[in-house]
Image: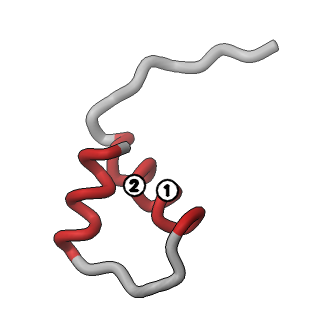
Amino acid sequence: MFTVRPYKEEDAAACGDCFYEGFFTCSVNQNDKMLLRDYA
């Protein structure tokens, strides 16, 4: 069993990067990163 720590605002960038790497094969620009960060 493990404990998941509470979400922090600074987690958003890493969540967006992970989401991108899991689903897309094209290059990403700053606008894409902002969209993925907001989605994550």
Q: In terms of depth relative to the viewer, which is nearer, 25 or 9?
A: 25
**For the residue carrying disc 2, how many other residues have a C-alpha within 10 Å: few (<14), some (14-19), or many (20+)?**
many
Which mark is drawn over residue 28?
none
Compared to 17, does 40 lie above or below?
above
Dot 2 amino acid type: Gly
> Where residue 13 sits in the image (x, y, percent)?
34, 53
Q: Secondary structure at mark 2?
A: helix
The residue beneath circle 1 is 19
Residue 17 falls in which quadrant of the image? bottom left
- The residue located at (29%, 51%) in the rendering is 37
The residue pinned by badge 2 equals 16
Q: Residue at x 43, y 52 (%)?
A: 14
Q: Using the rendered view, name the quadrant where residue 23 is placed.
A: bottom right
**Residue 12 in which image quadrant:** top left
Q: Which quarter of the rendering shows the N terminus? A: top right
* Residue in the foreground of this view, choosing between 11 and 23: 23
Image location (x, y in percent) of residue 25: 53, 81
Residue type for callout 1: Phe
User: Compared to 10, does 8 lie above or below?
Assistant: above
Secondary structure beneath disc 1?
Answer: helix
